[in-house]
Each structure stands twice: as C-alpha cells, then as structure tokens.
Amino acid sequence: MILDRFKVTGKVAIVTGAGRGIGQGSALALAEMGANVVCAARTREQIEETADKASTFGVKALAVPCDVSEHAQLENVVAEAMKQFGRIDILVNNAGGSMPKAALGTSEEMFNAAFQFNVTTAFAMTRLVVPHMQASGGGAIVNISSAAGRLIAPGFAAYGTAKCALSFLTKLLGCEFAPTVRVNAIAVGSTLTSALAPFLSPEMRGQMEAMTPMKRLGEVEDIALMVLYLASPASSWVTGKIFEIDGGTESTNWPFAPF
C-alpha cells in the first residue's frame, strides 16, 4: 500500500517548540502515524499536554522542558531521548520566531537574537542528533522556516533574514549529510496559531485572506502534513529542499505596519 510509506511506526522523533501551534500539530501527526515523540519546549504544562495527546495513539511520548537557546538544555533533550528510546530518527526544528519591527528600531542585539533563536539553535540541535541518526542507519530533519525568508515586506529585516539563512542552511546540510540523513525545510505562510492570533482582528484577517491566492490562512494541520511527508519514507528521495506551504502567496499578505 502506498499509504504505508507515510507511516513512521517505531521511529523516534524530537520536536522543539512542541507545546502549541505547529510544533504540537507536528508531534501529534507523527504520533498518529506511529512515531514515539519527545516533546520539547519551555512550558512544562504545554508539552505535557502534547505528550498526553500523543500517547492516545498508542505510542510513547516524553515531555522534556527545554529553552533551545540554552545549549545544555538541548543536550539534555537528546540525552533523555537516547535514554528512553535508544535512538533518534526524526528531528523537527520548530522553535523560533521574532516580532516584526522596523529596521531602524531594530538594534544589533535584536538582530543577533533573531538569528540565534531561529538559525543557531536549529544548527546546534542538528549537530547533536545527526551522529545518533547516522549510527542507526539514517534519519530525517525538518526545519520550520518561513515565507518571510523570501517575501519582501517592511518590518522583517531580522526575522526574514534569519529564516532565509535557515532555508539556505537546510540546503547546505542536506548536501553534506546525504545520503544517510535527509534535511528539508518548510517555508510556512501565514498560519492560524497563537503567535499570529494577537494581530488578527476580523478586518485584518479578511485583508490577509483576500491577499492570499487560496483565500484562507493556513491551519496547523496543513503544515503538520508536510512535516509528516518529509519525515517519512514517502520522501526518501528528497533532501536539501524548501517547500513553500503558504496558500500560493508570491507577494506578502502581511498588511500590518512595522512596529
């Protein structure tokens, strides 16, 4: 059955930022298709909720509190995964983000912080898991990038540059780690998450939908389905690629003025 190639039965997945939104949706999608999941994020209550939901699919789920900006905490996530499961097959580098801000209001510290949070942490986590993946015969890494890394809009000098860098890092690592470890990324468009919710008045949501060719904003499941594809054997001939899951946008659908 061709659908069997989307199963990840018995695999072990680490998902950062797994307490809510795309991270939670990704962890649950992988669990539903058979993976044991390690849910990592700063808020214990949120990742415990994700782990509880994941376990209802008959898999094992582990909640490990982690601030991805602290390298020792990244090491702890990997150590706990190896202690519990003895292997790591999938990594979803989802944790990241940065508030839009006008370039002249963005200090060097803010710019560097955006790069650290969105790029350096993913690189650090990748370096920690790849040896374990190689030791067990291979693996798949999915980086959650953003349409902000390719679309031009005021206010995204820091975040957009960081996500552009994450996308290019994906290409470089996909080449370097092939053929045993595949590395791909998703350039996520405007998706209905708690991060976007504070900006969405009914009027603003209507404007964004009107500016999106598919005439709606993304749902968490839209992104989670691509995560599943890229993490599963269904994409076994795919590496170093950036998938634009964004409702067809080729110009920004962000109607807000930079802060």
Image (cartoon, rainbow, N blue to C red):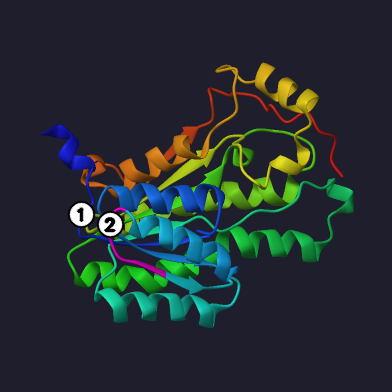
Query: Label 2: few (<14), some or many (≥20) within 10 Å?
Result: many
Q: Is residue 175 left or right of residue 197?
A: left
Q: Is residue 137 left or right of residue 209?
A: left
Give the position of the C terminus as an image quadrant.
top right
Comes first in the chain, label 2 or label 1:
1
Q: Residue at x 20, y 72 (%)?
A: 135
Of 143 and 215, which appears nearest the observer? 215
Q: Residue at x 61, y 42 (%)?
A: 149
**Tag 2 secondary structure:** loop
Of 66 and 164, which appears nearest the observer? 66
**Tag 1 secondary structure:** loop
Query: Label 1: few (<14), some or many (≥20) within 10 Å?
Result: some
Say which quarter of the image contains residue 215: top right
* x then y, percent, for residue 26: 43, 49
Q: Which mark is residue 9?
A: 1
* x then y, percent, for residue 226: 39, 39
Give the position of the N terminus as an image quadrant.
top left
Is the residue 81 above or below the residue 221 in the image? below
Q: Are marks 2 and 1 in contact (CB under 8 Å)?
A: yes
**For the residues marked 2 and 1, what is the alpha-carbon distance in whole angstroms?**
5 Å
Q: Amino acid at mark 2?
A: Ala
Q: Is residue 201 left or right of residue 60?
A: right
Q: Which mark is residue 35?
A: 2
Of 66 and 127, which appears nearest the observer? 66
Q: What stretch of residues is rendered in magenta?
A: 57-62
- The answer to whether residue 128 is visible is yes
Q: Is residue 217 magenta?
A: no
- The answer to whether residue 168 is visible is no
Q: Amino acid at mark 1?
A: Thr
Q: Is residue 60 magenta?
A: yes
